[in-house]
Amino acid sequence: MLFIDVLVLFIFFERTISQYIEQKRSALAIACENQLRFAVNDAGFSLAMDQRLLPEGDRLFFAHAASHLQTAGNPPAMPNTLESAVHETLKTGLATTRKVGKTIGLLFFQHESVIITYPVKAEGTIIAAGGLQSPLTTIYEDFRRIQKIALIFVVINSFFFALFGNRQLTRVYFRPLKRLAKRAETYQDEDTLVFSVRKEDNEFSVLSSSLNKMLDRIAEDKRVLKETIGSLKATNLELKKAQNDVIRAEKLATVGRLTSGIAHEIGNPVGIVLGYLDLLKQTDLTPEEQNDFIARSEKEITRINHIIRQLLDMSRASAGESKPMPIHQLLQDLIVVLSYQPAANAVVFESNLNASDDIVFADPDRLRQVFLNILLNAVDALNAGTCIDLRVKMITERTADDGSNGSEDEGAFIKVTIQDSGPGIHPSHLPHVFDPFFTTKPPGKGTGLGLSVSFMIVEKLGGHITVTSNEEMGTAFQVTLPLAKQPESTVCEK
């Protein structure tokens, strides 16, 4: 509406200016004819008409051709003035219209007045010319008043149109959107979300139908997802149970291997105790000899008790609780356990436990199972070969990177290397060392699950286990584990 107002206003403004100029031109023509007829003096100079007959602000100038010739030698009049325009018409014989000056018009600066000239001819000869300068400010003032009225009308109409448009927008768009938003906000997981609209909601009925179809698909997908999650949870529990069963079975198999070796170790002290008991039956023993035999028997019984307790510790079911565990102490305990094995009697265990921090956060029973499996495999490899120097080296070092996850925390891992001097692993067997049920031992000597279980335990702890082997250096297992962040004072005592 504002654009139309401005457009129409300027169209009528231009037409009004044109009509105003035509009226002034007609008045000038009449005035020039009257001036020529009644008001020419003997000298022929230009004579001004009575200004009282003209509207306020108008100015008339009249000149004869003779006066123009007499003043031709004088300095030219100022340009864009009434006199210069009249003399120009006397010279060219053409009626002219020009706008001069600057003043505030409509919205911007416009011409202040208009100069109109008219040539007077007699028998084809220009005998005189007249000019009229009329101000345009009166027209500007009139149109400014009209413009104010039009603007007021536009504002009032715009207000009513805004009210009407707001009502329509609220009814057609805002209220349906508000209802949809309120329905969505009050939705609960157990509710059935349905978007309903009224017939007058137009396009929102289509939107509501599409949303309801989408929500039906989402509800169906949610139901399927819940069933899938439940199934995955059940499968995960079964998988964990199966993993625990495998670890338990391998642990019992390891204990069985240890038991066969420990049986011989227990038999020797039992025989010694029985011998001392027979000696104690003699009646000719001095009190010193009796006390000596009792002390020796007590020592052997204590040895038997220590062996049995270690075997029980190995076979006890894991509580599944992770706690700070010192790796160095664990390795030393395993060396003591293996010292009772006849197969390890000729094996020399070397320990280079150089790691400045050896505390890891893990289940002690499962971590013990990892290193025991590796040490038993090393002892078996040494006994299966023809090597004279039977040696197992255990080396620990603190490392900044576990080699798999790109950790930047310096000293965050401990690497345990267990290397034997055996014949090594055949290159074709090396890629399958950690495969379940893979073994090169004779039937009945191994399950093929020891290293596979060890690999699984280490991976769950956030570490990794690797193996390298050659005929000259033997086989080396590297177990890398993340160090615990708990203070060392929390480490459980053995």
Image: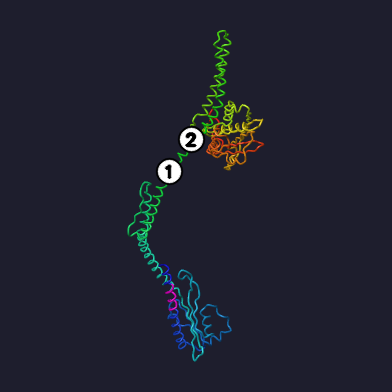
Q: Calculate the distance from the C-alpha at mark 1 to the C-alpha at mark 2.
A: 21 Å
The image's mark for residue 231 is: 1
Front residue (pair 227, 396): 227
Percent from the top left, x then y, of residue 169? 37, 60
Q: Mark 2 = which residue?
A: 245
Front residue (pair 355, 22): 355
Residue 272 in the magenta stretch? The answer is no
Element marked by disc 2: helix
Residue 18 in the magenta stretch? The answer is yes
The image quadrant of residue 157 is bottom left
Up/down of 291 relative to 250, above or below: above
Percent from the top left, x then y, of residue 483? 56, 36
Q: Quadrant of the N terminus?
A: bottom left
The image quadrant of residue 407 is top right
Q: Residue furthest bottom?
A: 123
CA neighbours of label 1 inside 10 A, class few (<14), some (14 to 19), many (20+): few
- Looking at numbered disc 2 in the image, what kind of residue is underneath it? Asp
Percent from the top left, x then y, of residue 116? 48, 80
Element marked by disc 1: helix
Percent from the top left, x then y, of residue 38? 45, 88
Q: Residue, x 45% and y 73% (percent of image)?
A: 137
- Looking at numbered disc 1 in the image, what kind of residue is underneath it? Ser
Of callouts 1 and 2, the N-terminal one: 1
Q: Residue furthest front?
A: 443
Q: Residue furthest left?
A: 199
Q: For the magenta stretch, what is the residue range?
A: 10-19
